Image (cartoon, rainbow, N blue to C red):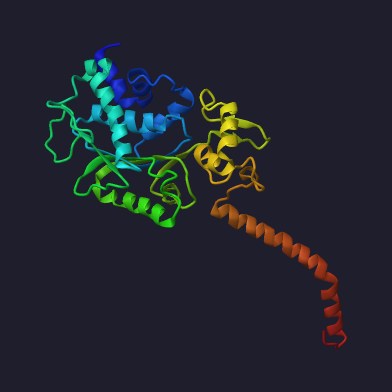
């Protein structure tokens, strides 16, 4: 394949870049092609909820950041996580690709600038614009940077067991997220990538936000006939999930692997038993229900009504 054709694929096919150039070989067409296409969508606000161990960070933070820079070397990216140190760990993995991936360097040239890169920020050699922000910077709930502006903000796992035990901790995460809004350039993109931890966590707030496009997937789903289908069975096998449920307990397993606050398998009222209706459907159902109930009521009241009318004809008060 010619060099320009390879570059075209890297810049416009996140799945190809992630698996074939960055060598995340465990990616599968199903389910990861769908995940990559979701992240490459035109919407500028996205919420991605995937089970643990399904490579959401590898795709959504590591590979996605690199792809954005390949298309636009002047882009400014913020990687934001629960802690500043966790964000720096994500950046460290990105640097390993930019410094040591021979195929990537062969296509785009050397990325590293002299005298080198800092632990918490990098600027690539391909940049031509002049900005106060580095190419990629790090932030965390514990360290919120202000005064900077970004084309892409990636929020990756802002919650853990360390910050969901009190309401104040959860609200601190939400406030830190809200402070990111003024840092986003007009037309910029914010991607939130995480799993569930609590019924009032950041994900719960964004799930109710109509401005966000959402992709929510569970490691296993129960079909109406009681059978199960699996999101990533090559890695998150039925036996692995069974072991995790036993080790974690139903609630924590449900959060981490089902992205739900209840485990449908053990719930008394299962999600599969419920159906969602539109407002128009509800209106039609309500009218039909009223008609049926009115007919039933009229049937039972018929003898009483007849007696009343009969009594009035005879001059009685009923």
Q: Is residue 24 above or below residue 197?
A: above
Q: Residue at x 50, y 39 (%)?
A: 256
Question: Residue at 22% across / 15% down in the picture?
Answer: 106
Q: Position of residue 95 (x, y in %)?
A: 26, 27
Which residue lies at the image location 41% right of the left edge and 32% below the top edge? 56
Q: Quick check: 257 left or right of 94?
A: right
Q: Is 136 left, or right, of 192 in this rendering?
A: left
* Image spot of residue 5 (x, y percent): 28, 16
Q: Please name whichever residue, 218 or 239, is drawn nearer the observer in this view of the structure.
A: 239
Q: Is residue 67 visible?
A: no
Q: Please state, as top left, top right, bottom left or bottom right, where the C terminus lies in the image.
A: bottom right
Furthest residue in direction top, as rendered = 1
Q: Is residue 99 above or below residue 226?
A: above
Q: In this rendering, would 225 be left or right of 17?
A: right
The image shows residue 164 at horizontal and vertical percentages of: 44, 49
Q: Is residue 146 above or below residue 258?
A: below
Quadrant containing the N terminus in the rendered view: top left
In this view, 96 is above or below 162: above
Which residue appears at 31% of the width and 33% of the height?
89
Image quarter for residue 86? top left
Q: Quadrant of residue 312?
A: bottom right
Tell me residue 261's x, y (percent): 54, 46
């Amino acid at each position: 394949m010619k060099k320009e054709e390879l570059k075209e694929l890297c810049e416009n096919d996140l799945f190809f870049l992630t698996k074939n150039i960055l060598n995340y070989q465990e990616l599968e067409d199903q389910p990861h092609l769908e995940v990559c296409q979701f992240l490459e969508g035109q919407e500028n606000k996205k919420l991605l909820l995937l089970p643990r161990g399904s490579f959401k960070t590898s795709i959504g933070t590591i590979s996605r950041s690199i792809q954005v820079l390949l298309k636009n070397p002047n882009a400014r990216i913020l990687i934001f996580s629960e802690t500043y140190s966790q964000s720096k760990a994500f950046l460290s993995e990105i640097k390993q690709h930019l410094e040591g991936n021979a195929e990537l360097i062969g296509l785009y040239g050397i990325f590293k600038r002299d005298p080198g890169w800092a632990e918490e920020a990098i600027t690539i050699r391909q940049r031509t614009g002049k900005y106060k922000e580095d190419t990629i910077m790090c932030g965390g709930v514990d360290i919120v940077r202000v005064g900077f502006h970004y084309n892409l903000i990636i929020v990756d796992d802002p919650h853990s067991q360390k910050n969901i035990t009190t309401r104040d901790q959860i609200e601190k995460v939400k406030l830190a997220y809200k402070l990111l809004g003024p840092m986003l350039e007009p037309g910029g993109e914010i991607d939130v990538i995480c799993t569930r931890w609590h019924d009032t966590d950041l994900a719960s707030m964004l799930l109710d936000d109509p401005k966000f496009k959402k992709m929510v997937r569970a490691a296993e789903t129960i079909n109406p006939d009681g059978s199960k289908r699996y999101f990533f069975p090559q890695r998150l096998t039925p036996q692995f999930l069974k072991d995790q449920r036993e080790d974690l307990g139903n609630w924590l397993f449900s959060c981490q692997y089902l992205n739900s606050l209840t485990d449908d398998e053990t719930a008394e009222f299962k999600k599969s038993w419920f159906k969602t209706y539109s407002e128009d459907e509800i209106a039609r159902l309500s009218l039909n229900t009223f008609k049926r109930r009115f007919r039933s009521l009229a049937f039972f009241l018929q003898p009483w009504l007849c007696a009343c009318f009969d009594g009035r004809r005879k001059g009685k008060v009923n």
